[in-house]
Amino acid sequence: MSLPLEGIKIIDFTGVQAGPSCTQLLAWFGADVLKVERPGVGDVTRNQLRDIPDADALYFTMLNSNKKSLELNTKTPEGKEIMEKLIRDADVLVENFAPGAMDRMGFGWERLQELNPRLIFGSVKGFGENSRYSDLKVYENVAQCAGGGASTTGFWDGPPLVSGAALGDSNSGMHLAIGILTAIIDREKTGRGQKVTVSMQDCVLNLTRVKLRDQQRLERVGYLEEYPQYPHGTFTDVVPRGGNAGGGGQPGWVLKCKGWESDPNAYIYFTLQEQNWARTCEAIGKPQWADDPEYATTKARQSHIFEIFGYIEEWLSDKTKYEAVDILRKYDIPCAPVMNMKEIANDPDLRESGTIVEVPHKKRGSYLTVGSPIKFSGFKPEIVGSPLLGEHTDGVLRSLGYTEEQIAQLHEHKVV
Ligand code: CAO
């Protein structure tokens, strides 16, 4: 079956997570993605947090499926020559090195344009080019702190908290993928490539935009009625951390279920949906609350919201999180069990949909990874294992016209 991005050649000059997550997505959709890696070393994640000695770590395999690997020292003259040949023939080059690394290597945006005016150059950095922090190296949690995620996550009496979701890394990769696809469509009209940049700070902020909404509301009215601090606590002039409060107009909380004393994930998320209050009261056995003026509106409920949640926890105390959701779904209550990673790994629905996939690997045996969360009616992305370091080096060199003798020499000089 022909895939939508078939024929799009991508040089994947990325490492760790932000860049690789972008190119992996494009590879799933059919792009020909060639990962260019330092000879003998490769992407640092090949070695990080290994669970099997001498086999690529899961950190690498889960972010580099469906790609090819070329070992190439792009700082040697011969390596640069090979890289230039690849660039002349490529549609896209993606990188997420430390600020300035591409220029130092001789592959800044101007040079890339000289080599191939149709090339789309995708780049991830921690901060925007104009930022006073543009020179900083950045990892995931640094970006979550700089982008507003950490200051608004966690509980009011604890420190800023980072999320387990990769809001800095994979989120930036997804943003970059959207930018690259947009530039590919634009190139069809203009014939020219362009530089597409994303900063991790911006991408975190884009997902934290409701907190910027709240900052403005707070400045206007002095309080935020959906936060646990309202109406009894105090507000400063900065959006506080709201614990597990719902981010919109529908209050909610993480509530204990049967077994919470020994199982740290025996909880559900429970939402008190305004338009579903009467049915919510019915579900939890408090029909008298439906018309009681103390409880009947979201505004009235807010002053005893934790009394209500406390009551619901009592109701939940003899129900597992799954039993609870099975009852509550009949009453249209927006809720879900708190899923732990073991449950997710074994979830039959996620497996069936291809969101959790088991992939073969030449050295590791099979491993689990997250497949495409984007589903298409016309095709189903097939996830294949990540490449071994340099697995495709000789094949790529042959396709560029190098003879076996030249290839042997390049190996000997550690260019590849
Ligand atoms: N051949 C020769 N040299 C190579 C090479 C290759 N194939 N691939 C990389 N290099 C060189 C780079 O040119 C760079 O050299 P200089 O320092 O001399 O310019 C060097 O290897 C290291 O580059 P790096 O970017 O990987 O540096 P690092 O490991 O110190 O930093 C990171 C890693 C992620 C902090 C930094 O790349 C960064 O801030 N990137 C931008 C933001 C980002 O994407 N972060 C998310 C990472 S996921 O958490």
Image: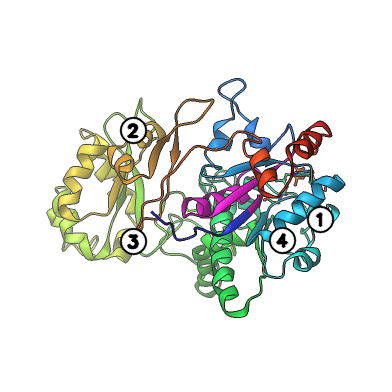
338 relative to 8, above or below: above
Residue 57 appears in which quarter of the rendering? top right
Label 1 neighbourhood size at 10 Å, few (<14), some (14-19), many (20+)?
few
- Check disc 3 and give the amino acid type: Gln
Does residue 374 show up? yes
Determine the residue located farthest toward the bottom in the rendered image: 189
| Mark count | 4
Q: In terms of depth relative to the viewer, which is nearer, 124 or 75?
A: 75
Image location (x, y in percent) of residue 86: 70, 54
Q: Which residue is mark 2?
A: 346
Name the mark nearer the viewer: 2 or 4: 4
Name the mark nearer the viewer: 4 or 3: 4
Secondary-structure class at tag 4: helix
Name the mark nearer the viewer: 4 or 1: 4
Does residue 239 show up? no
Q: Earlier in the sequence, mark 3 or mark 2?
A: 3
Q: Are marks 2 and 1 in contact (CB under 8 Å)?
A: no
C-alpha separation, residue under disc 3 versus residue under disc 1: 46 Å
Q: Earlier in the sequence, mark 4 or mark 3?
A: 4
Would the CB of label 4 be found within 8 Å of ligand 1? no
Image location (x, y in percent) of residue 62: 52, 39
Read off the magenta span.
Answer: 11-38
C-alpha separation, residue under disc 3 versus residue under disc 2: 31 Å
C-alpha separation, residue under disc 2 versus residue under disc 4: 45 Å
The answer to if 352 sits in the magenta stretch is: no
Would the CB of label 2 be found within 8 Å of ligand 1? no
Image location (x, y in percent) of residue 93: 67, 57
**Image quadrant occupied by the C terminus:** top right
* Left or right placement of residue 91 versus residue 77 in this view: left
C-alpha separation, residue under disc 4 versus residue under disc 3: 53 Å
Q: Which residue is mark 4?
A: 88
Q: Which residue is mark 1?
A: 100
